[in-house]
Amino acid sequence: MSSRENVVAVDFLQDKRFLGHPKGMGTTSFMALAQAFGNYGMSAILIYYLYATAAKGGLDFSQANAAQFVSIYGSLSFIAGIVGGYVADRLIGIRKALYINFAVKTLGYLMLAYPGGPVLYFASQCCLLVASMCAGTSLYALAGKLYSKSDGRRDSGFSIMYIMNNVGAVAPVITGTIALLLNYHAGFLFAAGVQCLGLIVYMLTANKVFGTAGLEPDDPAPADKRTGFILRIVAVIVLLVAVIGGLFASGILTPTLFCNSVSAISIFIPMCYLYIIITSKKTSREEARRIGPFIGIFICNCFAQMIWWQSTSILAIYAAERVDLNFMGITLTPASFQTIPAVMAVIFGSVCSWLWIKMGNRQPSTPLKFGIGTIFWGLGPLFMVIPFLLYAADVKVSPLWLIIFYALIIWGEALTSPVGMAAASAVAPKAFTAQMMTVWQLSQSTGAGLSSLAVNFYHVGQEAQYFTGIGLATCFVGLLLWIFDKKATAILTGSNAQAS
């Protein structure tokens, strides 16, 4: 799969064949679209498939169990990504990891496409987790290899991937319609087909557009020890599954308790991971120094993700209970509000990508972009304080309130998400290329954990105070990053210039 036959030497700095970017960005962007389509397309109909009756083509679980199973998979996929980053960096290399990841994911979706009952469902979830354990966020790590540390196109390139990822996020509309008109298995089959298409494009273009980049592990374990490493990883996973299975069987562990425990642990895992990377003997002093400002960016994204999880929980309930769903002669559904962020993300992401290319060397620094973007994230919940103060609980409000809320936070996301991924790839020590991207992705699980903690302070009738608190906290961390922009930029770029 990682054969060097037909590998073409590529000068990435001079390569501008894809919208001014290296041609490899076209491949990674399409793969991001295919991956997002498969994931979102599967996730959108999975919970309904789990609790639908057998007569309606479902597995007939209770709604509570269905929600718990989906939540467990989401939590474990983040943790599995940690293993995937290690496997790619030390054992098999990014390129081979991506082959395995896309092939095994396609198989996982195909298992759902076949009506095999609960057994095949659980097998598919294990298959998808194994895929994550083989690659983590290697796709973004490979994209990072297309740019030198000082290449001004990096932020714009990751903005393109961000856009394509959000194009893939419209999958729920398609797979949901297919499931409604045909059945759930046909919806899963369509998701598998798009995921497989990403694999085919990768197979046909990889050697031509990536050259030798990512063919070998960045921090290879000694050849005679790789098999032992793999066997130990497999042994630990099998033991962990056996222990968890035993605890479930004994009744000591419940799905709810397991989900809560995983969520709590997910808050601390990135911190420990960053500490290991910074203090590793394989990380030079200069590499460790550059990670310092990245930690500030990481913390800002944790707060941003906390707000995102609020939008899918408390504000999702708000959409169902307190929003007038008759808008301009159209009857909306509460779920339809979840399509708005994807559409906005494509539009706003396109604007940012064009803007960074247009501005070139005059574009704002990474910390400044992220600080301003984080403040936009905080303005979202602060804006929602207004309808909570103006209207009583029994008054149905205009959907424009939620639409403007999404406009604020998605503009913040367009400024932060691709820039954050670009920063993670730029500061990654050579020995931890894929693993740094995994750490960045873990900010999502940390944000989810912060959201769970924040909900403890949520009380019906006190929504204004609640959203004021999380909005101000998010704006505050964004403002701090903005204030220390020059210092952070000097460290990130290796400049000796001092902040004025």
Image (cartoon, grey):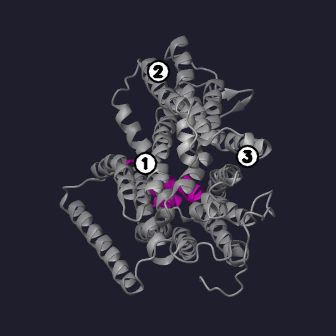
Few, some or many C-alpha atoms within 10 Å of disc 2 (few <14, some 14-19, many ≥20)?
some
- Position of the C terminus, as image quadrant, is top right
Under mark 3, the amino acid is: Ser
- Position of the N terminus, as image quadrant, is bottom right
Residue 207 % position (x, y)? 69, 78
User: Was residue 295 drawn as part of the magenta stretch in this picture?
Assistant: no
Q: Nearer the viewer, residue 405 or 211?
A: 211
Residue sitting at x 71%, y 45%: 346
Residue 114 makes an appearance in the image: no
Label 3 belongs to which residue? 353
The mark closer to the camera, 1 or 3, is 3
Residue sitting at x 57%, y 22%: 383
Under mark 2, the amino acid is: Thr
Q: Specify the quadrant of the image occupied by residue 251.
A: bottom left
The mark closer to the camera, 2 or 3, is 3
Depicted 429 relative to depicted 363: above or below: below
Depicted 172 relative to depicted 356: above or below: below
Q: Is residue 350 left or right of residue 199?
A: right
Disc marking residue 445? 1
| Marks 2 and 1 close (CB-CB < 8 Å) | no
Label 2 belongs to which residue? 468
Under mark 1, the amino acid is: Ser
**Label 1 SS:** helix
Q: CA distance from mark 2 to mark 3?
A: 31 Å
Q: Is residue 410 left or right of residue 316?
A: right
Q: Magenta residues?
A: 39-64
Residue 84 % position (x, y)? 45, 67
Depicted 206 relative to depicted 312: above or below: below
Q: Earlier in the sequence, mark 2 or mark 1?
A: 1
Residue sitting at x 37%, y 79%: 230
Q: Is residue 248 left or right of residue 396?
A: left
Q: Is residue 152 left or right of residue 465?
A: right
